């Protein structure tokens, strides 16, 4: 797809846009997230990446896109591609957020880059986040959002009812539904199977990148401050068997049963 100069300029003009979101950090969302992940929350502080259950704005029906994301152009650039996905990022936790105490998140569109990949033109948008509580900086974060065309339909690695290879597991429909709820994520690829297959060309429901990132982070991180980086490399569906692999060097990955790495990550203590 050719990106005309006017479209490119309009997208790049969003660089510098900012939002400020206040949240009381009520414990209920973290408690629900812990139950969902199978790791009940201990104590009154949030582990790294668990803040994704907070600072999530609602938006009116008029501001919803066809996929139930917030419509592009309101805050993020209106790149001329139908798919928008969380491609990776980094989370630096200087100190843990304490539940039940107000916190403020600042959001800024930091970069807009058009690139040509194997599947055609894409747009990568870098968004910076910082979270403060009681006057102290707790979290610094960069998220990379990728916009792209739909491309060829993705094949299923396993049919429902087929055995799951030993040592692997599949995410379940219910996990995706309740993760969408606790993170206030309306994106239809996570809960609307007909939309996935008929509109987006996916074989089944798509597992949230942030949920996989949190699973990896929880398996890799140590105590104290640290920096978690992650990058999505291949999609995971509810029928896709996966397992987490970690090493002693701070690196880890989410491995699919076909040998493809779906997400790679690293934890670096500060």
Image (cartoon, grey):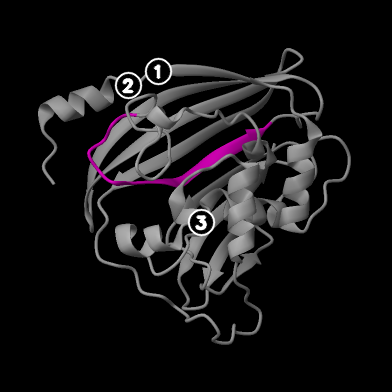
User: Residue 201, can we see it?
Assistant: no
- Marks 3/1: CA distance? 30 Å
Residue 2, x across and y down, in percent: 11, 42
Question: Marks 2 and 1: in contact by CB < 8 Å?
Answer: yes
- Marks 1/2: CA distance? 6 Å
Q: Earlier in the sequence, mark 2 or mark 3?
A: 2
Which residue is rendered at x = 51% and y = 56% of the image? 191
Mark seen at residue 2: none
Residue 103, x across and y down, in percent: 70, 20
Mark seen at residue 14: 2
> In this figure, which residue is indicated by the disc labeled 3?
191
Residue 193 or residue 167, whichever sits in front: 193
Pair 2/3: label in front: 3
Region of the chain picked out in magenta, as a range: 77-93
Q: Main secondary structure of the magenta part?
A: strand
Mark seen at residue 17: 1
Residue 65 or residue 154, whichever sits in front: 65
Quadrant containing the C terminus in the rendered view: top right
Left or right, 54 with respect to 60, comes to: right
Res. 219 image quadrant: bottom right
Question: Marks 1 and 3: in contact by CB < 8 Å?
Answer: no
Residue 144, x across and y down, in percent: 43, 39
Label total for image: 3
Label 2 environment density (alpha carbons within 10 Å; few <14, some 14–19, many ≥20): many
Which residue is rendered at x = 46% and y = 46% of the image? 187
């Amino acid at each position: 797809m050719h990106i005309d100069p006017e479209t490119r300029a309009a997208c790049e003009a969003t660089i510098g846009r900012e939002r400020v979101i206040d949240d009381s950090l009520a414990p209920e969302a973290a408690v629900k997230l812990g139950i969902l992940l199978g790791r009940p929350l201990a104590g009154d502080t949030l582990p790294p990446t668990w803040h994704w259950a907070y600072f999530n704005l609602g938006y009116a029906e008029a501001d919803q896109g066809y996929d139930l994301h917030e419509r592009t152009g309101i805050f993020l650039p209106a790149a001329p591609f139908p798919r928008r996905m969380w491609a990776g990022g980094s989370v630096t936790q200087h100190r843990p957020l304490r539940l039940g105490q107000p916190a403020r998140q600042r959001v800024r569109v930091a970069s807009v880059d058009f690139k040509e990949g194997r599947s055609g033109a894409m747009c990568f948008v870098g968004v910076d986040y910082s979270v403060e509580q009681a006057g102290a900086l707790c979290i610094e974060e960069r998220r990379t959002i990728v916009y792209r065309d739909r491309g060829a339909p993705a094949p299923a690695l396993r049919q429902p009812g087929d055995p799951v290879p030993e040592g692997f597991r599949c995410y379940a429909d219910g996990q995706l539904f309740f993760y969408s709820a606790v993170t206030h994520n309306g994106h239809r690829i996570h809960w609307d199977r007909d939309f996935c297959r008929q509109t987006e060309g996916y074989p089944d429901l798509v597992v949230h990148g942030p949920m996989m990132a949190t699973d990896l982070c929880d398996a890799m991180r140590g105590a104290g401050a640290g920096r978690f980086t992650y990058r999505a490399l291949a999609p995971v569906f509810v029928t896709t068997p996966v397992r987490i692999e970690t090493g002693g060097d701070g690196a880890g990955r989410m491995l699919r049963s076909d040998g493809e790495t779906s997400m790679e990550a690293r934890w670096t203590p500060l």
